[in-house]
Image (cartoon, coloured by chain):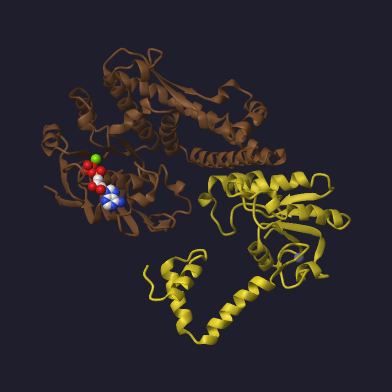
Chain colours: A yellow, B brown
Amino acid sequence: MQFPSKLIEEAVNEISRLPGIGKKTALRLALFLLKEDERTTLSIADALVKLRTLTQYCSECHNISDEAICTTCSSPRRDRSVICLVQDTRDVLAIENTGQYQGLYHVLGGLISPMEGIGPAELTIEPLVQRIQRQSSEVKEIILALSPTIEGDTTAFYITKKLKDFSLKVSTIARGIPIGGELEYADEVTLGRSILTRTHYSHDNK
Amino acid sequence: MFLESLSLTQFKNYRSEQLYFDSEVVALVGPNGSGKTNLLDAIHYLSLTRSAFHSSDQHSIQHGEDFFSIKGHVQRLGKSHTLLCAQRNGEKKVFSVDKKPYEKLSEHIGEFPSILIAPDDTDLIREGSEFRRKFFDSLFSQLDRNYLNTLITYTHVLKQRNALLKHFAETRSTNPDLLEPYTQQCIRLGENLYEKRQAFIRDFLPLFTARYAHVAEDQEEVAISYQSDLEEGNYAQRLQEAVSKDIQMQRTTLGVHKDDYLFTMNEAPIKRFGSQGQKKSFIIALKLSQFETIKNDKGYSPILLLDDIFDKLDDKRIGHLLDLLANKQLGQIFITDARPERTRQIFGSGANPVQMIQVQNGSILSTP
Ligand SMILES: Nc1ncnc2c1ncn2[C@@H]1O[C@H](COP(=O)(O)OP(=O)(O)O)[C@@H](O)[C@H]1O
Ligand SMILES: [Mg+2]
Ligand SMILES: [Zn+2]
């Protein structure tokens, strides 16, 4: 691509580093930022700088936080006996949006994947062990809420090995047929797993 | 199964072309380099979601363009379906049937089966074990979706395990707890694949030997023997014991990823002891029994793609193929030939009407 100015070229190169954004889209965004009211552009830039420099990670659960300890970890209303293990912040948001969970979280920051150079040291596994050690009288259960992939399963396996000396209940979220989903359209792996991990039938089941 | 039409957009040397098929036998004729094989490959894409000839979809996008699309209308078991495969530069390949996109491409494998017979098929005899694994994996995958899913998962686990072994070797450290889940998965998935491959080959063999006897008209006794690290038994223990060797080699040294299928004639490897003619017969028999296996499983014929086979086969073997055709044992066939007169001559006497499609330089000239 030929650019009329070095400044545009530089902006396009930087913006196209964002995931899912190619050079064409980056050019469109750069021209937009140039044409818009100057205040809009500056406040976008300002928000990005603040996002990066001021964002902290909660020292307990490692979720994104405005304070050293996040609002979930410091809330007196949360059940401190359960910790739900998730891959990243998006999973915390998804589970929070269900309104079904009152416990705490621990954000791993990824899943083990040697191919991508991600080992246990790149994740918050050691901090998790230390956290449970500190709170061993409180924590009773760990819920593994990781994706049903090789990487998720490996990470779950590894973490349970690390936690085997604590007397904890370790559970994993149920995986199965989506509500409203028809059985015959479920793939065989999901259906097979749902049969194996079937639950007791009760009239209270919704 | 019957392919009624094909639309290509920026696929290889086709800018924008539509083809309509109204015969069971379609001959694609034209000079070398005109795009006959590319048409077969487009059909291969619709059947198996990928090229028969190269692993990168990028190569199928017309030079200088940023996407291709292939669309086809197919009759199957009395119903008509629209298949669409599209690839845009740097994006995920899209595949849809009747406008419903798949989440995973593997869901399509075996739904609209096809078999390709190509000039380089003798590679199956000549080349290393990965060619034979690929051939049988492709066949078994079209028969059994679970087999394909297990294979995909196994391959992924293996890549992770090997990456980890490499990491151990480079950092001169090991972490048994981290290797363990991969080892466990290799065992579980590997044993599953081993049992399935054994069972599939058991069923395949009688079909194959009968077909060979028919094609070759000789008394040689041919066989295919499946060979695996797992046949010695106790794979779990042996894989565990091999860990230090695996770390040293930086890869998984035992497993179904090293399986082979030994092709023999009178109990000697055909690779070394077979004549040219016997090898050709062996390959044709292999492909035709692949065809039959799928046909028996699905209850209808896969599409048969024959690339330049008249150059490779002698009259006797061509005659044999025509017999099958005359007996209505084959379904729809697409056949390429650089020499239209030859095709016309070969098919001219047969009972089946042949649709001749003339290709030149990425354009469809006429349908005489
Ligand atoms: N991505 C592509 N873009 C443009 N042309 C291509 C592309 N891939 C292959 N071709 C062209 O297709 C031609 C080969 O077509 P092919 O089907 O193999 O011919 P044949 O009729 O001999 O079977 C070559 O001229 C090659 O340059
Ligand atoms: Mg060709
Ligand atoms: Zn927190």
Q: Is residue B199 above or below residue A92?
A: above
Most distant residue in the front direction: A6
Left or right of A9 in this view: A159:
right
Q: Is residue B333 above or below residue B220?
A: below
Residue depicted at x 60% and y 39%: B166
Toward which corner of the image does residue B33 lie, by quadrant? top left
Task: Please name whichever residue, B99 or B314, is drawn nearer the observer in this view of the structure.
Answer: B314
Q: Where does residue A203 sit, x and y in percent of width and height?
A: 71, 57
Most distant residue in the right direction: A137
Toward which corner of the image does residue B297 lie, by quadrant? top left
Q: Is residue B25 above or below residue B13?
A: above
Q: Where does residue B1 sit, x and y in percent of width and height?
A: 31, 43
Image quarter (top left, top right, bottom left or bottom right) of the C terminus of chain A:
bottom right
Left or right of B356 in this view: B287:
right
Regarding ligand 3, which quadrant of the image does it lie in? bottom right
Task: Please name whichever residue, B76 or B96, is drawn nearer the observer in this view of the structure.
Answer: B96
Residue B73 seen: no
Residue depicted at x 81% and y 57%: A131
Q: Where does residue A81 sit, x and y in percent of width and height?
A: 82, 59
Image quarter (top left, top right, bottom left or bottom right) of the N terminus of chain A:
bottom left
Residue depicted at x 43% and y 70%: A25
Task: Please name whichever residue, B73 or B220, is drawn nearer the observer in this view of the structure.
Answer: B220
Task: Please name whichever residue, B189 or B279, is drawn nearer the observer in this view of the structure.
Answer: B279
Left or right of A43 in this view: A62:
right
Residue depicted at x 19% and y 52%: B363
Residue A178 seen: yes
